[in-house]
Image (tube, coloured by chain):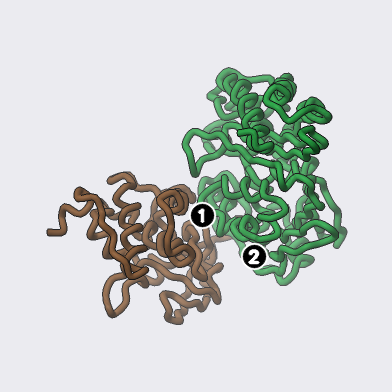
Chain colours: A brown, B green
Amino acid sequence: MPERTKQKTHIEFTLNGEAVEVAFAPHKTLLEVLREDLNLMGTKHGCELGECGTCAVLVNGRSALSCLVLGLEAEGRSVETVEGMASPAGLHPLQETFADTGAAQCGYCTPGFLLVAKELLAANPRPTREEIKEALCGNLCRCTGYIKIYEAVELAAARMRGEELELPREAVYGLD
Amino acid sequence: MRPFKYVRASDAAAAARAVAANPRAKFLGGGTNILDLMKEDVERPNELVDVTRLKLSEIKAASGGVSIGALAKNSDTANHPLIRRNYPLLTQAIVAGASGQLRNMATNGGNLLQRTRCQYFYDTAMPCNKREPGTGCGALEGLNRIHAIFGWSDKCVATYPGDMANALYALDAVVRVRGASGRERAIPVGEFHRLPGDTPQQDSNLAHGELITAIDLPKSNFAKNSYYLKVRDRASYAFALVSVAAALELERGRVKQARVVLGSVAHKPWRSLEAEAALVGGPASEESFRRAAEAALAGAKPLAHNGYKVELGKRAVVRALMRASRLA
């Protein structure tokens, strides 16, 4: 075995629209670099094996599992985490609808769902329920089930198109 | 994860040389199978040679067919207009696998090289000849519900779990590889993976340090009548129990040419020449497909817990052929 290297590697990349520089041990995953070296705790540690989706981030606009990407792979690329979704004007429509419809319970899976849903809506502003299911199949939720999550994505998609969507009464019981 | 040396290759030749020079070095592509296996302590490379920035991701028309770069992402390959139009079987097989996030990351070359999902291979507390030659096979007399029904040996009963390779085999694809000496060779997909025999630690016929550069698809007459059927424990995001890549060339209702490749039933994609022989010259009919399915599974040797794969395999062959010929 090689000795555990003390030497850190240094990279630059774009994180949530801003240029960042960071130094870390070269064997670290992007997930670890984001959480431990950049102090962005929104991206969650789940299974660590590419099975649960909670560590999903967008790399150059496309979803990837940060637990299976080396931090070094981010060099020169653009990474978006859940911290980058809200703007000074407020939450992203998906964040609003996830809150409004109760699409989060413990919330641990939510960052991954939000980013993968954002990727879906960027490519397909009017997804069917089946397309939403397929896009989100790599994200696991162990609390609520998925119906409210699908509804939240449908409602956000509608609002982003400038439309409003009537959801089933039970989906919005907390709103009034 | 154990520490390792990280090297970013400047070109394909340097990458192949770097891995060839160190018996414990591995290529790093999309990382979707090497990094999880490293975390599980199944793979223990002391050096990763990152090939992801090499210019090997082009998908282009070539000599009547299409050449897909080894580093093209699975999602880009599945969605490419040349693939969707001429090789819809490949698109179906790729999107049947993994999740969107993983397909965005996974490369075509890496997909071919994914390792088995045998639980005994992943569990370092159990014996496994594939992981540690000479320790025995935990699955042979253990829980072998997901394991092979063809071509296994008393050293290993694991299956190759992928989808893409089954479609590539049915489409007569060829894998282009480049060795450290610069020597290039072309390996038909059917000869790329191997049966376990006495050396199950070797999944493929690649030499250490050989780098996959492209996968070539010849011109195909199967685009109109092909279907990839994947049967699994849940409807999405799971590995196959049995899958079937079926491709037919039909002429006035009769089968002129056929390909039947089964997945997740052997240590490699399992083409059934018997089923194909039963189909060619006959009508595209359910009766004929049933005969082909019987022929395809006739030589199966199930283990204690996977006898269901024989009947499942027959029904899957029939359904895939029915869908391919648009009878269902």
Q: Identify the mark nearer the N-term, 2 or 1.
A: 2
Q: Determine the chain carrying the residue at label 2.
A: B
Residue B155, by quadrant, is top right
Residue B282 in the figure: left or right of residue B293: right
| Residue identifier under label 2 | B52
Whole-percent x and y of residue B118?
Answer: 57, 34
Q: Amino acid at mark 1?
A: Gly
Residue B49 in the figure: left or right of residue B65: left
Q: Nearer the viewer, residue B16 or B73?
A: B73
Q: Residue at x 69, y 36 (%)?
A: B325
Q: Amino acid at mark 2?
A: Thr
Work out which residue is located at the far left of the displayed protein and give it.
Answer: A176
Q: Determine the chain carrying the residue at label 1.
A: B
| Residue B100: assigned label | 1
Q: Residue at x 84, y 52 (%)?
A: B186
Sort mark 1 into few (<14), some (14-19) or many (20+) by Cα contacts within 10 Å: many
Q: Nearer the viewer, residue B240 or A83?
A: B240
Q: Helix, strand or loop at disc 1?
A: helix
Q: Nearer the viewer, mark 2 or mark 1?
A: 1
How far apart are the two marked residues, 2 and 1, measured between alpha carbons? 19 Å
Residue B285, by quadrant, is top right
Picture quarter with the C terminus of chain B: top right
Work out which residue is located at the far bottom of the displayed protein and give it.
Answer: A19
Residue B67 in the figure: left or right of residue B89: right
Q: Helix, strand or loop at disc 2?
A: loop
Give above or below for A85 relative to B324.
below
Whole-percent x and y of residue A94?
Answer: 32, 64
Residue A52 in the figure: left or right of residue B119: left
Q: In this orientation, does residue B300 appear? A: yes
